[in-house]
Amino acid sequence: MKFENVSVSNSQVFPEDQARLAPTPTRHVPGVWHSNGNPTAGRQETSLNGSNSSPKIVLYSHDTFGMGNIRRTLLLSHEFISEYPGASILIITGSPMIHAFRIPKGIDYIKLPCLDRFAAEHYGPRYLAGCPEEVKETREAILRESVLRFNPDLMVVDKRASGIDSELLPTLHALRENGRHTKLALGVRDILDEPERTRKVLAGNGSFEVIDEFYDEVWIYGSKGIFDTTKEYGFPESVVRKTFYCGYLKRPTILAKRSDGPPRILVTTGGGGDGSDLIEAYLDGLSTLPRNVALRSTVIFGPQMPQERRLGLLRRFDYMADVNFLEFEADITNLYAESDLVVSQAGYNTVCELLSFSRRAILVPRSEPVREQLIRARLLAERGFFECLEPQDLTSETLISKVLEALNSPTMPASDVDLDGLPMIRERVRTLLNCQRRAA
């Protein structure tokens, strides 16, 4: 058994060749800021149509449970800075893990007080539980002041048109009242929850009215052929007209040399907040295998797994010599590339990574408090992309049996899925910015 408590300094979300030296300290003249200490290197305001354009872009990610929102936000940020090297990109996020990722030049972030999800559509402070109203007001104020003062050309909002508990609405109204010309795009993953519940939520919280009033476009990070989001969730025609199916968001991939030896299994549950039962079932099953069945496993607990649960698993299974335990890894590209099989939940980002690498996988989806993962896992399993183990059927025996079956199967997983989400988003951003005229 090997356990690695991965340090933040060694974690990275972008390839090493994307890392830049820190910029030259900025020289400050009262009332004037210059980029890189050069008074002549100010931001170009006159045009956003050429290769030298330098748009200002805000990405707002409320971030409550898991790692999916912030990973998706960072992926989009990297895409934007690659398309517009002179851009200034500001992430406004509630993720408690944003500091663990390598942030390239041109991108910075503002951290909101953390929230947690306690039930479907029920959120509260993660760490400051004694002052929920103060946390709500603080998040609203940070959002409003940051966006107004940054004055972006484009703002991309993740999943919730009004933000958590409508915390973004004051900002949206302020942009309009102050005559700003910020373009607004709402990014929505393929599946939110079961259709009936989602229709009620969207109708009850006024999401469609907010989209109609404030947003220029809606981007769906999925394929209409797998899940018809606008139909299943009852989008009104006015919203359908500004909605674009972008495709799934392909992740950067690498080719790894497969070393001789036992098959390599990667077990990951994203943030890990509710992933301990899956990890325990896998390790229990692994412990029952006869000596002539060898597997080399890497288990990632996730930063949100309760410490007591993580330490309990380590105490029980620390004798396993062929298991490498990781607490957290910001970039698991190499682990995907080296694996023969992945055992995971069915979060959006995990599924995109699996599709990008064309990896065999056994999905054990979360089914509460929302059924997003369960629906996604079933749909993709029906189309031959992955195996799905229903959460109520999770036992050590059934899981390890599926692992062995998958390793011995000659059938390769299906690969005909739309992974052109990022090129499509680049096209949509160009369209929005090309018709942009900044406020005076």
Image (cartoon, rainbow, N blue to C red):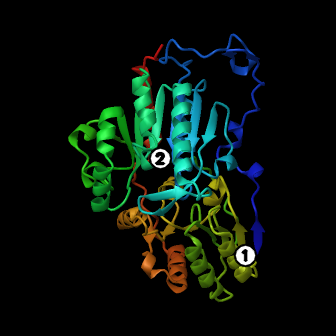
Q: Residue furthest left?
A: 237
Q: Quadrant of residue 199?
A: bottom left
Relative to 97, residue 260 above or below = below
Badge 2 element = loop
Would you call the spot at circle 1 few (<14 residues within 10 Å), some (14-19), or many (20 or more)? Answer: some
Observer-nearest residue: 370 or 72? 370
Observer-nearest residue: 85 or 358? 85
Q: Which mark is residue 47?
A: none
Which of pointers 2 and 1 indicates the residue nearer the eye? Answer: 2
Observer-nearest residue: 84 or 321? 84
Q: Is residue 21 visible?
A: yes
In the image, taking residue 414 as reference, residue 38 lies left or right, namely right
Q: Residue at x 63, y 79 (%)?
A: 283
Q: Which mark is residue 249?
A: 2
User: Measured from the top left, where is residue 40 in percent x and y?
Assistant: 69, 10
Where does the N terminus fall, quadrant-wise? bottom right
Q: Residue at x 28, y 53 (%)?
A: 233
Q: Which amino acid type is marked by label 1? A: Asp
Q: Which amino acid type is marked by label 2? A: Leu
Residue indicated by mark 1: 322
Observer-nearest residue: 225 or 177? 177
Q: Residue at x 26, y 47 (%)?
A: 235
Would you call the spot at circle 2 few (<14 residues within 10 Å), some (14-19), or many (20 or more)? Answer: many
Contact? badges 2 and 1 (CB < 8 Å): no
Badge 1 element = loop
Relative to 15, residue 154 above or below = above
User: Measured from the top left, where is residue 130 in percent x and y?
Assistant: 59, 58
Q: Residue at x 51, y 52 (%)?
A: 356
User: Measured from the top left, where is residue 169 in percent x and y?
Assistant: 41, 38
